[in-house]
């Protein structure tokens, strides 16, 4: 299959616990790093509450505007887990027992343990494709370009292996970081000039405070290594002129 | 002033570094917890790239749909800091030097240090209100219901003190957590019944894995303490029946 160059995605974090600040989301960072590594650019992330209409409306916008949508959260056994039913409604599909998922969980649990609560986790949009879960059995699922993953970070991570088989990526996005013992305002003008001369390289500037000292990380991102290298040389040049120290970071 | 009961907000995280996964956003959690404590409910969070048109379009949607919008990121001195100019355009306001911000930074820096790079940080939408920054001098700003904060978490936190004077909150959202040595599927049905009998209390169920053991935290949220207490009693009842252990968490 020929790889398209620009493949993009949205991440949809579903969960009141993130919006209340109770839980620190880490799934965005996990998914974004992984997607970048397989050449999928994350265009946007949204965090929304466990409210059916909002899930449906948001999903219908995101799936039209992106090659892929990845949702996290709301596929467990409790009353506040409404992602699977909402996805069914967003696509106008029946919400029903998924035979294969039923078999997986039936054999995952000991006899008698596959109770009503757990059986909720095999209700999915009709004909959904499963995303296998090596950690805790209950699979995620996908419908067309929408991939539904759990909210628990360790379980989500363990499902990326199977998910990888289902995603067609583009050219991996390469990056190079130069960390400096300086402050942003010392390099702002020089960096602007380098950015103007290297439109195809995304140059980010990020202040940091580490081990009691201030610094700035310059991050160069592109699909093309030689463009990054060229940009890097121009930055090294002005750093040398300004006698700024490069640091490990 | 009479407090409205429901005050809502959106958080807009501006920054390629979050979308690439390089940086773990923690500002959402900081802001959300703080907003909840002053009675402001976070309706949604969006993370978007440093692209002017996207910032303008997203901001114009969010500021219409919410009582408040809080942006983070993009107000530093480098070329990728385009939040202030984008906010100006979103409101159709001039982007100009803010006299008061200029004076603040002029006296903050030593003579000769207030260079061109740093002067970029005093360009703002005309007549913007400043949000004072006790950490590093450069103020944030607000225009109408939009409040623009920096991306560096420690600096953002230090600005909440001044920000508090500018926000009118509602009734604080109260919460109570019960953590149990169980799994979600054991309590799912009972919890659904309690939720059905307590429509005004938001009941969330969150599995955790701590110190080698699985558990579930049940979180009750409402503006009304007696409704939380009532709901709590019903949960304690079924926990006792099921002989589930309550744990500290």
Image (cartoon, coloured by chain):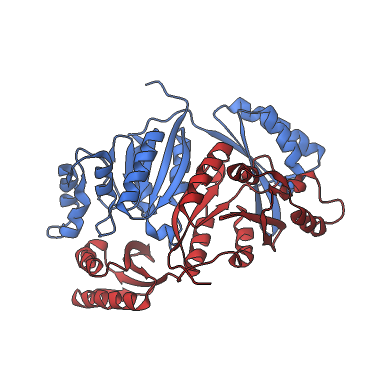
Chain colours: A red, B blue
Hey, which residue is sitting farthest left in the picture? B112
Closer to the camera, B69 or B162? Answer: B69
Instruction: Decide: is A168 above or below A17.
Output: below
Quarter of the figure with residue B242: top right
Hey, which residue is sitting farthest front in the picture? A1
Residue A171 seen: yes
Quarter of the figure with residue A22: top right
Residue A246 on image: x %, y %: 31, 75
Q: Is residue B133 left or right of residue A61?
A: left
Residue B201 on image: x %, y %: 61, 31
Q: Is residue A94 left or right of residue A191?
A: right
Instruction: Decide: is A1 above or below B23.
Output: below
Instruction: Decide: is A156 above or below A219.
Output: above
Residue A28 on image: x %, y %: 50, 56
Residue found 56% across the figure and 45% down from its top: A15
* Number of marks in picture: 0
Instruction: Decide: is A16 above or below A155.
Output: above
Quarter of the figure with residue B89: top left
Residue found 36% across the figure and 37% down from its top: B63
Residue A21 seen: no
Hey, which residue is sitting farthest top in the picture? B2
- Which quadrant holds the N terminus of chain B? top left
Closer to the camera, B180 or A175? Answer: A175
């Amino acid at each position: 299959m020929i790889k398209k160059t620009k493949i993009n995605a949205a991440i949809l974090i579903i969960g009141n616990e993130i919006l209340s600040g109770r839980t620190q989301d880490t799934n965005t960072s996990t998914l974004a790093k992984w997607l970048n590594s397989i050449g999928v650019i994350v265009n946007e992330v949204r965090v929304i509450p466990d409210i059916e209409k909002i899930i449906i409306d948001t999903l219908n916008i995101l799936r039209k505007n992106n090659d892929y949508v990845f949702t996290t959260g709301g596929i467990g056994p409790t009353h506040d887990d409404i992602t699977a039913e909402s996805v069914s409604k967003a696509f106008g599909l029946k919400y029903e027992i998924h035979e294969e998922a039923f078999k997986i969980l039936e054999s995952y649990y000991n006899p008698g343990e596959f109770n009503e609560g757990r059986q909720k986790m095999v209700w999915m949009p009709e004909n959904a494709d499963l995303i296998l879960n090596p950690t805790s059995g209950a699979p995620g699922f996908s419908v067309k370009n929408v991939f539904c993953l759990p909210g628990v970070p360790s379980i989500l991570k363990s499902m990326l292996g199977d998910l990888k088989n289902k995603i067609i990526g583009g050219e991996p996005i390469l990056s190079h970081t130069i960390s400096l013992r300086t402050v942003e305002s010392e390099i702002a003008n020089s960096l602007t000039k380098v950015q103007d001369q290297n439109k195809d390289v995304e140059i980010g500037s990020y202040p940091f405070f580490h081990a009691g000292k201030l610094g700035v990380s310059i991050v160069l991102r592109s699909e093309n290594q030689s463009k990054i290298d060229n940009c890097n040389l121009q930055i090294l040049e002005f750093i040398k002129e300004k006698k700024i120290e490069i640091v490990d970071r």
